[in-house]
Amino acid sequence: MKHETIETNAGWLIVLTLIVISVAGLVEILPLYFIDDTVEKVEVGGIETVRPYTPLELAGRDIYQREGCYLCHSQMIRPFRDEKLRYGHYSLAAESKYDHPFQWGSKRTGPDLARVGGKYSNEWHAQHLTNPRSVVKESIMPNYPWLAKTDLDYSDIADKMRALRHVGVPYSLSKQEFDNNVRRFGKDVAQQLEISSAEDNLIAQAEAKNYDGNRDNLSELDALVAYLQVLGTMVDFSKFDDGYFSKFR
């Protein structure tokens, strides 16, 4: 049958379009009935390495969204060779399971940030956010100088963690929940996930890491850099055999 015949015959066009859509739908849906889970199991020594954000990282994520960073930066490395060569291992579903909403995106005016954590120093990020062209000459990213000058408002951080708890993020309120987090993530991480200690944990992390390079204040820049520095760092791919994650797809 000639292609022109299909295009000029409404009946044939409708029938064949429905067939194509049906086959494509089956290809997408049927495999889901033969796998146990589409979210990868990421454990090392019985401890889950993909964890919820700490209070400071969570505050930074909110600033990331507020400033519209997701409009120019995606956070999803696709399973293609060119993306792997530039950004690293393709993104796992597990890495976004505590994101509400996720930051995958499809617009890349700037590079993908899924694995930017640890790639640059805190000082580089602070300078880049304040004046991007001082470190990347050809950058078209706007300046964000107010982040370093604005004190971080973390008065509602515990409330934010309580809200996320309702959608399945395992921040703890009770001793039972804390003990469960110890089993899942280890004691150090479990302590960071305690809602009752949210403000103390936020301040302690900011003071210990000094993300913005200024110990005289706790700024929005501290929080945003803390968030950027954790992206893509929760999975150590060297701990897993080649092909391990492919069985979840």
Image (tube, grey):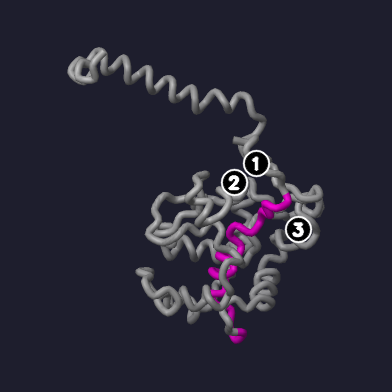
Q: Marks 1 and 3: which is nearer the front?
A: 1
Q: Which residue is mark 2?
A: 92
Q: Residue, x 51% and y 59% (percent of image)?
A: 113
- State the image quarter where residue 70 is shown: bottom left
**Residue 56, above or below 124:** above
Q: Earlier in the sequence, mark 1 or mark 2?
A: 2
Res. 190 mark? 3
Pick the front one: 208 or 158: 208
The amino acid pointed to by label 3 is: Ala
The amino acid pointed to by label 1 is: Phe
Q: Earlier in the sequence, mark 1 or mark 3?
A: 3
Q: Residue, x 38% and y 70% (percent of image)?
A: 139
Q: For this view, does 35 lie left or right of residue 10?
A: right
**Residue 22, above or below 51:** above
Pick the front one: 63 or 40: 40
Residue 230 covered by magenta stretch: yes
Q: Which residue is mark 1?
A: 245
- State the image quarter where residue 39 is shown: top right
